[in-house]
Amino acid sequence: MRSQKGTTSLRALLYMDEIYGYLPPSANPPSKKPMMTILKQGRAFGLGCLLATQNPVDLDYKALSNIGSWFLGRLQTERDKLRVLDGLEGAAGSQNSQFDRGEMEKLLSGLGNRVFLMNNVHEDGPVIFHVRWVMSYLTGPLTRTQIKTLMDPKRGDFEKISRETTTAPANPMSMPGMNAPSASPSPRPLVGSGVKEIFISPAGSGDDVTYHPHLLRVGTVHFSSGKAGVDGSRTVRLVNPILASGIDWEKSLPPPLKCEDSTNEPASGAGFAELPGFAMNAANYKQVEKDFAEWLYRNERADIFSCPSLKAWAQLGETEAAFRSRLTQEAREVRDEAVEKIRAAMSKKIAALESKMKTAENQRAKEKAESSSAAMQAGVSVLGGILGAFLGRKSGIGSITRGASSIGKATSAYKQHQDVANAEAKIEGITAEIQTIQKELDEEISRISESFDIATLQLETESLKPTKTDVKVDSIALLWLPHDGRGEKAW
């Protein structure tokens, strides 16, 4: 965990069921210190920890206070309930979140069958949910009697297969006489000085085993690329049968594991197939070594994958599936960084529009107040003019003046009403802009998520070629492989 760089994304999850005894409140078993370290520091490295137990008193209270998400079922004892409440309160305090102990105790007491309470210190409050009803029949390990009852109907089939294997010919495609064992094993051929011989030990005893000659070629090819950060080597092992007419270059056998390190002595009692004369001459092996070095230089290539969007390269010999799996975390982190960047940019725009919105709302409130005042004044002026007319005032000039004043106030009231309408239209325009930006943000987040989807991430392939100095021939040897009486491999 500590060898990884920090991250805010989840890289891995450690899950442990039946935690009883591994993280106790009093004792200090060897498992306690590393588990406490994971609970305290794991989140900084992207490592989550999921622990399960039937009794919360099995866990140390310091561990409980470092757990942010709780899934709680019905608690059987009051002691368990108190430990859970203490842990929840400690976890809430460490995250500076609100915690109502009385309300939480009431919720825990009311949980029924298959009803759970989820409490996350990062959320506003706990959530109660039901789980699906599942039935499973778990009877435990089988007894000997139960195993016998299950196997009795199958016993006849096994006996039939055994009889057929015993009576059937070893090789149904063989000609008569092919499977007949030789009268006596052939002696070991003598080879020239300088010829390295390697004998692969047979799977069983050396009886009825015949060694067949093969050519073993082992070489190491080094690949390096500063751009891709690749620097490694690959070992190439090739095994070809040696026939009387020459080496069968078209037929390549899978080599035994690290066959160049095998024994230099044959198994006791084993026979040998015929070894052609050219395979006994050490000079021929020198020529094979030169040809093999040239073949490695011209044919061996290392294909490595790269991801241009993440600027990442695969390791030497890493498959596409393994490379994509390794890129999952990196792609998630780059995606999260890109999403946060676009969120920050959009948030600035939204914040500016919200500031305009606040100014427009204040202006609308002001215009509404002025409009109401102007409308009231216009109404009073008109009412005054009507009352003056009914009361029989004779001054015509005064009536005209009051009429002009009423018209002016009515015009002002209408203008104030228009100002209110304009302010509301401005607010609606700002609201529409905010909604448009939010829609663009959602679409951009969706596009970013799709572009960093590990399944569709575009990969490229580059082929690395070695230099002649990067090619080394480790071994050219005469390899003896054991075969049984049917001519099949016996190693």
Image (cartoon, rainbow, N blue to C red):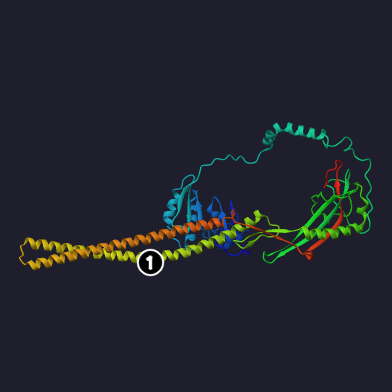
Task: Measuring from the top left, give residue 289's x and y in whole percent.
Answer: 85, 59
Q: Secondary structure at mark 1?
A: helix
In front of the other: 469 or 333: 469
Task: Measuring from the top left, give residue 336's x and y in whole percent.
Answer: 53, 61
Answer with the quarter of the image where residue 177 lies: top right
- Residue at 54% x, 55% y is 450
Q: Is residue 106 above or below residue 138?
A: below
Three-letter code for the amino acid on which mark 1 is drawn: Ser
In front of the other: 154 or 429: 429
* Residue 37 visible in the current orientation: yes
In front of the other: 447 or 22: 447
* Residue 272 visible in the current orientation: no
Task: Measuring from the top left, give residue 126's x and y in whole percent.
Answer: 45, 54
- Residue at 78% x, 57% y is 236
- Residue at 37% x, 66% y is 356
Circle 1 is placed at which residue position? 355
Q: Is residue 207 above or below residue 436?
A: above
Q: Is residue 154 above or below residue 280?
A: above
